[in-house]
Image (cartoon, grey):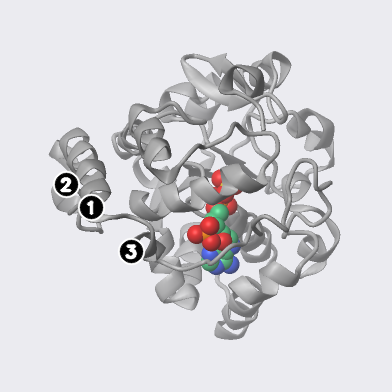
């Protein structure tokens, strides 16, 4: 594994992996022309991005499995800021679905003048850091995370891809997007996926039948997605993602943090997050202690 200097580029003070990003790809994002019927899912890494890459096309097309069975997730619902967007953008059919890890301040000008809708997915940061720690071990294009203890410090200081979790969440909670934005949590999706799908479908103006929701929920279960070669990253060479070290679809649960933090680490982690989220704390769906 390489050092962080080799694997990341710095863009507006954020670390972005060189393997998937470049100065051309971020320029392409800056100049990207959003359309009114585009749908964008925004996440801090490890909050449920891949899950939404499965859900969105199915909700938008009423449950037709063709795209999720034939197109790899990174081309099916591409990242706004990644190199692949320029390659596949002309093949996307409207309504186009995309994902992004960008904070609000990095959205391109056309996003603000369009009516494109946004779904912001939030996840308990205690589970995000655990998921990210394992991801850094299996992803050959990321830096060595060190020990979990060392990774906690890196995460809290924002020395990880896309910076601090607290900055990201705060940036997207104070927008002027009105009813163009919907908030959902990973935990809500784990607890009751059909109900989450109903919320998403209503937000996107799709009147899906209960039968369609059931079909989509079955297809987007952790087990089904783990077996879908278009979504489990098994098409990616081991050099970049080594599922023998850890599968990308690792556990898919809420609360795995309990198996990883010791008491001191939990206190350290929560005190920093609590302090930085001071003004938001009452409306967070998790306890930070
Ligand atoms: S990335 O690298 O930012 O795109 O990662 P991201 O997709 O945001 O997050 C990966 C975590 O999401 C879990 N995941 C799911 N959980 C439950 N059900 C389904 N269907 C599902 N699909 C993806 C995935 O397992 C990662 O979480 P962990 O905790 O590591 O298992």
* Placement of the N terminus among the 4 image quadrants: top right
Sort mark 1 into few (<14), some (14-19) or many (20+) by Cα contacts within 10 Å.
Answer: few
Sort mark 2 into few (<14), some (14-19) or many (20+) by Cα contacts within 10 Å.
Answer: some
Q: Nearer the viewer, residue 222 or 156?
A: 156
Mark 2 and 1 residues: CB-CB less than 8 Å, in contact?
A: yes
- Give the labeled residue for mark 3: 258
Between the C-alphas of marks 2 and 1, the distance is 5 Å
Sort mark 3 into few (<14), some (14-19) or many (20+) by Cα contacts within 10 Å.
Answer: few
Q: In this view, does 16 lie to the left or right of 194?
A: right
| Residue 284 marker | 1
| Residue 34 marker | none
Q: In this view, does 44 lie to the left or right of 125?
A: right
Between the C-alphas of marks 1 and 3, the distance is 19 Å
- Give the labeled residue for mark 2: 281
With respect to residue 144, does 208 lie above or below?
Answer: below
Ligand 1 is found in the corner quadrant, namely bottom right
* Placement of the C terminus among the 4 image quadrants: bottom left
Between the C-alphas of marks 2 and 3, the distance is 21 Å
């Amino acid at each position: 594994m390489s050092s962080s200097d080799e694997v990341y580029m710095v863009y507006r003070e954020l670390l972005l992996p060189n393997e998937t990003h470049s100065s051309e790809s971020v320029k392409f994002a800056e100049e990207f022309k959003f359309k009114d019927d585009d749908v964008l899912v925004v996440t801090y890494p490890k909050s449920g991005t891949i899950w939404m890459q499965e859900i969105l096309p199915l909700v938008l097309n009423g449950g037709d499995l063709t795209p999720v069975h034939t197109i790899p997730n990174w081309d099916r619902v591409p990242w706004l800021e990644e190199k692949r967007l320029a390659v596949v953008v002309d093949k996307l059919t409207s309504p186009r679905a995309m994902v992004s890890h960008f904070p609000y301040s990095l959205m391109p000008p056309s996003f603000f003048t369009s009516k494109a809708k946004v779904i912001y997915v939030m996840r308990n940061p205690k589970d995000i850091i655990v998921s990210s720690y394992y991801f850094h071990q299996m992803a050959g294009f990321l830096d060595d995370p060190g020990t979990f203890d060392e990774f906690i410090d890196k995460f809290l200081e924002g020395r990880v891809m896309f910076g601090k979790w607290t900055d990201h969440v705060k940036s997207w909670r104070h927008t002027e997007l009105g009813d163009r934005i919907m908030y959902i949590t990973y935990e809500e999706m784990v607890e009751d996926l059909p109900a989450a799908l109903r919320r998403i479908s209503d937000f996107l103006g799709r009147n899906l039948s209960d039968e369609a929701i059931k079909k989509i929920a079955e297809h987007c279960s952790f087990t089904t997605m783990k077996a879908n070669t278009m979504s489990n990253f098994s098409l990616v060479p081991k050099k970049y993602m080594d599922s023998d070290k850890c599968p990308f679809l690792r556990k898919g649960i809420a609360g795995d943090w309990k198996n990883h933090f010791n008491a001191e680490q939990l206190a350290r982690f929560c005190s920093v997050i609590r302090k930085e989220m001071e003004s938001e704390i009452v409306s967070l769906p998790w306890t930070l202690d």
